[in-house]
Structures are given as structure tokens and as C-alpha cells.
Image: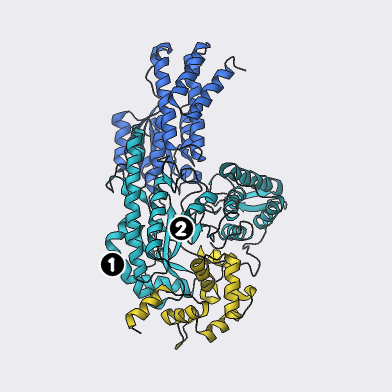
Amino acid sequence: MSDFANETKAVIDAMVAYKVDGIQKAAASAKAAGMEATEIIEAMGAGMSEVGIQFQRGKLFLPHVLSAANGMTAAVKELEADLPIDQVGTTLAKVCMGTVEGDVHDIGKSIVSTMLQCGGFEVVDLGRDVPSPDFIDQVVNNGCTMVGLSALMTTTMTVQEDVIKLLKEAGVRDQVKVLVGGAPVTQAFADKIGADCFSESASEQVDKAKALLG
Amino acid sequence: MKSMSEYCTRNGDGSTLYQNKEQMMQDIRDGTADAADMAGVRELNANEIDHLFEIISSKRRVVGVERGREVVLSYDVGQLDMAGDNGNSGGGIASSRLNGALVHERTLCADTFELAHTDYSIKPVKPVIANEMNDMENIQNNLTIPYFYGAMPNMGLYYAPDGPYGNPADLMREFKIEEAQQEAEKSAVHLARDIEYVSTRVYKAGADGFNFDTTASAGDADFVGTLHGVEKLRAQCPNAYILLGMAGENVMGIHGEIEYDGQVVAGLFPQEQVVLAEKAGADVFGPVANTNTGKSLAWNLARAVTFVRGCADVSNLPLHVNMGMGVGGIPMAETPPLDAVTRCSTAMVEIAKVDGI
Amino acid sequence: MSIAHFVASGMGGIRAAGDLVARMEFDQRMKIDEAKDYVAKKLGVTAFDLSDECKLREVREEQGLGVITGVPGTPRGIAAKMNIEDLLGIKINCCENFRNYAKR
């Protein structure tokens, strides 16, 4: 059992309570108690995951998610002086997100983008009806190591496979992780087209994206 | 060869699954507990759980309600299920709208039906409303069953680039929370106005009423805009049949604070949604429960029945539960399997006590 | 999928009395049992019989309520709906329009 179990719980609870000053206070208290900055940030990350789950279950709403993320950002800034230099200002990975070409639904995709951003990823949101080569361009020329593809129709989900093919043709398939989602998409479909990750919900997508980082 | 003690059932994606009694019962208990926890409704009791197990575990290909317990069916996407493309689960059978309606009435056993535009949303229908009115008049002359006009409120179409308002989800990501909320509120007002425009005109053309499909698909402001639209329709057309069907089991809190009749609508579950639907003037309410493709039919159906039963326990309005691909316990599959569909249909009538599907 | 639902739990529309029960649900916000009782009383059958295609075929033919097969010279469409109005004691929107347009 960690020496800082109480402080960890307090930080997680503050995240779920989503008030910016509450989160900053909990982080400051944990630091004053002797908890390492990296551990405090990890606890805030766990809290952010719980916020995502509560959003999915209808207990918290998008402004609450953003407020929690804001609080975490503010608290991390105050901890920066105690972080190893190579961890300051870093993000987990750079993800390009988009609804595939021919599909104009973007509510779910936008929520996932928001959750990924709140979860510590750098997100390049390409919007909707995105031409497939634009995803490749983000990988080749903009340093994205993850590609998130959303499709809400059975007629457009096949484009997710097309993008994966284009990644292979560009010789970069093994450099990226491909995340797929959308109402008609299933694990079986994701496996069939060779995607790395499928999720039923936005909060699940963040956890699975983090797991892909190893 | 599978053990005789195992039952052939389905996963949420439609694939075959074999479960023994203990596994199936555990999934039923877990599914009902999940819904009860989320929505704050009661779990299914022991009798209901046993009844559900009996329905799901039957070795019959088709499971049906007892004679005398049949209910009525209402529809979405109208004739597009025949004439539409795969995106509408359509058969791609070129057919006139009149033919589509008559086929459903005379050969596909429809109790009600609806006219649907290919672009099945309020915003794109507005500029072509005269065409819709024309077809409604023609078809009503020939049809005997109640015939609605159906469309999705689909407030997402009012956000840039399709519409005149900023996209709240994008603005939220830039931490422009107040601006995002204001854009959502303006969209809701515009949606309500367009609903009034479209629905009153098709009613004037002879429609029996209006089906609002996938209400709140764009979140809480979409729900509020639609409720206000229903109010306007009811005020101008007091005898219109109004069916208000939802998009998900809870109302997504994209705005987070927008209210209807003094109540924040974000996070509302079916038993709370129906109250507002009645206040706005709807006649029939369509609750929704979404299918999880990674879980079994038993889990999904128990969960869906729990949500809907919780709604039925308090609703003054008749309920027509949404039971298409991926909702109401039905697997998310382009060709939903007959065994799963009939089990879900039966369970919703006999356990969730719905008035229609 | 509509066929699957009909087979499992549907009333069958004008094969039997499904359209009539649906009208009462929407017109008067009646729940299923109340709507069935109302329609059954009007038709002179039991609620149990409302999905019985054999019983209801005869009733529908006798009362001009519309049937699923193409029988020349029998009411269908607007004409059948006008008979349904009289049976159920309701007004149907397109029938009102028809009367207004025909100026009768």
C-alpha cells in the first residue's frame, strides 16, 4: 500500500468534482505531504479516466470534463518545477482524428477528441468528411503516431479499411496505431480491417489509446 | 460438439455465442444491475429474470408473445427500408413512395407507417417541403393505416460547416465553454422554428402526425430544441399524432446546463425523458437503450428491458420502444438475426410492458 | 426486421385490427390494453381476438374498414378511413381535408 493512498484518493476525488481550484488545492496538498510530482500527475490521470467514465454514464457533462482538464492543466503547471526536464510540457502522443470521407457525423468523434486531449494527448482534429490522404499526410508530415477514424454509417465504415491500406502503401503503417469507432463499427470489423484498437465509448477509447503506448 | 447444457445465443455484434445457464443468468443479472445503477431505476426482480432467461434460452428459432398480448408497430425511415441504400438498412429496391407505403400496409403487416425523405432530417427537408406535402396528399388517398411524416431533428446539421452556428464540441475543446453553450442555444431555437415549419405543413397536407426520430442525437440542446418544436406543433395542430423517439439511453450533456421547463436535461434517462415529452405535447414516447457489441444478448437485453421497464413504470404516455439495429437489445449487425430480434421483441412486450415497438 | 417484429409481437395492421388500436394509442394516448378494449368493444369482438386474422377479416369486410387483398369494389384508403372515423368516433386528418376539398 502506497504511503500516499489518502493523497492519491483526494486528488482523484478532486478531479471527479471537476472544480479547478479544488484540483489545484488537492495537488498542492499532495505535494506538501511529500508526494512526487510524477505520482501526483499519475493520480490526476486516473481521476481524468474516472471523469470520462462518469461522462459516459451520464453523471458528468462535457463542461465538467473540460473543467477537470483545465484544473489538471493548471495543477501540472504548478508542478513543472519539480518534474524532470524531459517531462515538462510533454504529451502522451500526437493523434489525428477525423470522420472519414463521405460521412458528416462528428458528435462522437469530437467527444473522443476532447477526451483524448483531456487525457494528455495532443490532438489534431481534421473534422468530418476528411479525404483519406489527409490522414496519411498527418502521419508523414506532422508527426502523428496515432490515427483515429470515426464512421457512423455502414456505407462509410469501409473507408476505415481504405485509410489503413493507404498507410501501408505509404510505408508508414507500422509507425502508427489506428483507432476506429462509430455506431456500426464492432471489434470483429476492427480485427478484420487490421485496426489496432476499437472502443464502444469515448472514455474507453482514451484508456485503450494509453494502453497502446505500452 | 457443444454440450447439451449450453444454449446457442448471440453476442451484441450478432455473432454466435454458447452459454450455459449460469453464464446466461449472470449476464442477465449484470445487465439489469448496470442499467439500474446508471438510471436509478429498479433492477428486474427474480420472476422477471427467470422469464427473461426462459425467453432467451428457448431452443426455438422464433420466440413470440402469448396470443392476445400483441402490440402495435411504428417505424422510422419509412419506405427507405425498401428503396434506400445500405446506410438506411435499405434493400436498394427502386420503388415509388406510394408503392413502398402500400407494400408495407398490404404485405409487410404494418400497423402504422411513415413518409421519409432520403436525407432523413428536418433541416434538408425544409426547402423541399412542397414535394413532401404533395406525396403525403397522394399517399393518404390510398392508405388505410395511420401514416406519419418522419424525420430526425439532427441538430448537428445546424453547426458549421453545414449550418450557421459554431460547433460546440470544437469550441469546448478550445475551452470556449460559454461561447459553445451560446451556439448550442441558438441552434436549438433555430431547430424548433424549422420543426414548426416542416411539421405543420405536412400535417396540413394530411399527415396523421409526425415521428421525431433519434431526438437528442446531438445532445441536450438538441433535446430542448425538439421539445420546443413539439410544443409549437401541438399548439397549431391539436389533433396531430406525435411520436417522440430518442437517440440514446441518456441525454448527452454537451451544453451541460440547458433547461426545459426549469429542468436541466443533460443526463436524463428514459423515465425522466418521458415526463418532458408529455409536457411538450407528445402522444407516444420511444425510449432507447444502446447495444454494447462486446457483451452478450442476455446482458444487453436485460439492460435494455430494465431501462424501458423503469420508464413504463412511471409513464402516462404509451411507449413504443426503439428496436432497430443496435438498440433495444438487438445486435448491431446489418442483417440482425431473426432469433435475437424475436427474443428482444417478446421480452420488451412481456417484461418491459411496452405498448408498441 | 419489421417482419421479425410482426411475427414475434405485432398485431398485423389491416390483416387484423392493428391500425385501429394504433389510432387509439395516438389519438387518445391510450395504453395498449385500454386501446384494445376500446376497439374490441366498437367492433363487437374480444380484445383477445383483435389479432385474429380470420375473425377480423370478416369484420373488416362487413364494416368496410379495408383489407390486405385487392378486392374490387371495397373501401380502401380514404373511404375505409371514413368508415374507421365513424367506427372509432374520431376524426382523421386527411379525411377532414378530403371533405373540405370536396366541399361536402
In which image quadrant can residue B126 be found?
A: bottom left
Of A104 and C63, the residue lying toward us: C63
Q: Which residue is mark 2?
A: B244
Chain in yellow (letter): C
Please tell me which residue is depicted at 35% across the width and 64% down the height of the picture: B200
**One can see residue B70 in this view:** no
Q: Position of residue B321 (x, y in %)?
A: 53, 57
Mark 2: secondary structure? strand
Horizontal side, residue A201 vs residue B303: left or right: left
Residue located at (49% from left, 21% from top):
A42
Please state the horizontal and vertical placement of residue B193, each as a whole percent of the image.
32, 55
Of residues B265 and A23, the one nearer the viewer is B265
Q: Can you say whether A71 is above or below A187 in the image?
A: above
| B55 sits left or right of C86 in the view | right
Mark 2 surroundings within 10 Å by alpha-carbon count, few (fewer than 14), some (14 through 19), many (20 or more)? many
Q: Is residue A163 visible?
A: yes
Give whichever of discs 2 and 1 has the lower sequence position. 1
> Which chain is disc 2 placed on?
B
Name the amino acid, label 1: Ala
Q: Which chain is blue?
A: A
> Looking at this view, is A212 or B139 the one in front?
B139
Q: Mark 1 belongs to which subunit?
A: B
Q: Mark 2 is on which residue type?
A: Leu
From the image, tell me which residue sits under label 1.
B130
